[in-house]
Image (tube, rainbow, N blue to C red):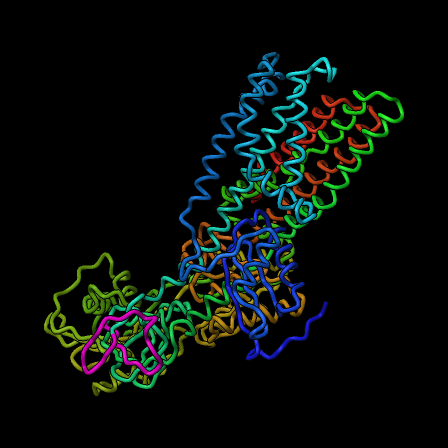
Amino acid sequence: MNKQMPHIEQTETFRFDIAGMTCAGCAGRLQRVLGENPDIVTAQVNFALSSGVVSAEKGTLTQSGIFAAVEEAGFEAREPQKNKLLDDGKLLQQLHIHLIFSGIFTFPLVLPMLLYPFGIHWHLDAFTQLLLATPVQFYIGARFYRGAWVALKHARGTMDLLVALGTSTAFAFSVMVTFWPEVIGTNDLYFETSAVVITLILFGRMLEEKAKRGTAKALESLMSLVPEEALLLRDNKEILVAIDSLKVGDKLVVKPGQTIPVDGIITEGLGEISEAMLTGEPMPVLKRVGDNVTGGTINNTARLVIEVSQKSTSGRLAQIIELVRNAQSGQAPVQKLVDKVSSIFVPVVLVIAAMTFFAWWWGSGDIEQAMLSAVSVLVIACPCALGLATPTAILAGTGAAARTGILFRDVDALQKMTKVNHLVFDKTGTLTNGRPKISSAVVWGEYSESLLLTYAASLQKGSEHPIAQAFLEAANEMKLHTTKEIKAVPGRGVEGFVENKKVLLGNAKFLHEAGIDIPSDGKIDVVGSYSFIAIDGQCEALFILEDTLREETPEAVSMLKALGVQTDLVSGDHPDMVAHVGQALQLDHVVGEMTPEGKLGYIDDIKRQDGFVAMVGDGINDAPALAKADVGIAMGQGTDIAKEAAAVTLLRPDLRLIYWAKKLSEATMRNIKQNLFWAFFFNGLGIPLAAMGYLSPMVAGGAMALSSVFVVSNAWLLSRWHVKR
């Protein structure tokens, strides 16, 4: 049903946490249920963050009404915890413990099967198998029974229902054989079948929970950028207050080295602000009275007084957090496929089993054969291979990727990487090394380049400024000089005495203000940053600083172009610098001076043009675009926020890994499809044979085990994948 969208002013938004979702299908179903409510305008359920957002016309709904609707759908809604998305880790810890417990009890059950190929015929007696399988079935498997019960109450088929149905059938049949073998007419047991299925599915749930925590961690890392308290200036006194209590118009004091707590306007002071979290650029920006500053950026040099222009809940960083939160919503297509199959498969199998039982009973009057055939249908329909198909391929593919230096967060990233035809690069720290280096010098005076370098480095001993670090690194093995009266001038440079000589190091304005002439009027034909050095009133040289390209970058771009991938560059850096890099690499399109919102819009534009886009970045400013892109790729040495927002992480700064990530994802998705084929092939062939009485429960169990062997063996072949040089 199409709903008419009211004006934004006429709606109110409700946020809430959700408990009880066990798969991506749960989120999809809950979103559909909420969307069908006539009072709800939009509903969005985020499985990764276990949260929901609902907008409704003002006055039509309450929080308690939404909670009731969620609970009616079979889930639990809770008030969201402020600035906290991660739980205390108890669920993940519980999954770890249950998996170990399940593995310990399951291993003896499968050991006879493992020993059989070596000619060792060893079996556990029926009662020992029952004792081992029971805690796995009813203690570890309780989560599946709870999920199946909810699914039944709401008349929906899910993987939980499929797991509970298959394992319960195998377990119940084995119990009957244990106590009444003469009634059943066989001594074959299937305890290992139920235990193995539960253990493997539990392993998949544990991997899923880890991925969910990684997603939440990205947002918590963003939230941690802003301090919880600020220095409020009132009646010329500095008072420490919580940032939540700040109002627009309040005056705050921000001291050197402190993080700016909220968005504001400078009313007193002049200083350099590190805006790397916004632009990704390491060079600080000079800010003066009247300039805007952003919460989360860092005041590097001087005491500033700022006037609050936005509350912490509506500032720039809050907007970035919201962009990341919204962009991370979604479901993995392969997981949705399995859930869709389950919703159809479960009732079909039940109907076939029931029809088989009554057909044999009515046709032959043999109730034992009727039960055996019906049980055979349910046993061979047990979703062991179906449950293994995706996790084993993912395990093999991600293992091969990790050995290569690539980390995939989930199957969705693997699947989408195969379709990428458009790649958007950040510049600083991605295509380049991410820090300025002294690339060359132009010397005009009588001093040697090496001596001038030691003078420049001596002036900047102990400084953390990126330019200072470039000089200190260049003079790393040289002996530095004694200095005195060092003074840093924000936005200009640094001055002091080196070996009793007055030395200035900085930009052209700095030297002009000191009355020092620059040869050629300082018109230097270079792309990048540069610093002049003057000694005793005479300009002696200039040092050119460049953020150089990574050594492997040109080859990586060529490899990706060979796959037909369009390569773009978007950066917060100056357009001239961005154009220079784009030309050097022969990129298809370049844009400079891009904000985080601009990068997000750029990604959106590509997606609207039916492009399948991957974004490669390393900074906080890249996080929204990394999350919004079909595939976000973070550099391993980048910020934790970038890595958590991205679906793929490169463990070493080698962009050629993107090429291999695409090739490996294609191999992994082929493997998943092959595994699903074999899983459905054995079910599709086995069910009619079992229904016609050609398969006993033992043969059905063997066929089901054989399908698992096919799936695992196929995944093992994938684990041998390696980079081809």
Q: Looking at the image, can residue 492 be seen?
A: no
Q: Which residues are magenta?
A: 232-255
Q: In front: 609, or 36? A: 36
- Whole-percent x and y of residue 618? 44, 60
| Residue 436 pos. (x, y %) | 35, 66
Left or right placement of residue 702 versus residue 483 in this view:
right
Indicate yes or no whether the magenta region holds residue 238: yes
Residue extending farthest right: 363
Residue at the farthest left position = 500
Q: Position of residue 280 (x, y in %)?
A: 41, 67
Residue found 77% across the figure and 28% down from its top: 374
Looking at the picture, tell me which residue is in the foreground, 701 or 412.
701
- Above or below — where is 534 with respect to 151? below
Q: In the image, is 251 to the left or to the right of 115?
A: left
Q: In the rendered view of the protein, which quadrant contains the C terminus?
A: top right
Q: Is residue 675 magenta?
A: no
- Residue at 68% across, 29% down: 169
- Residue appearing at x 65%, y 49% in the figure: 334
Which image quadrant: the N terminus? bottom right
Find residue 255 and report its image quarter: bottom left
Q: Residue at 56%, 66% (x, y): give it.
A: 54
- Place of residue 132 in the rendered image (x, y in percent of width and height, measured from the top left): 54, 22
Comparing 148 with 388, the one in front is 148
Question: 109 above or below 491?
Answer: above
Q: Tell which of 75 and 307 is nearer to you.
A: 75
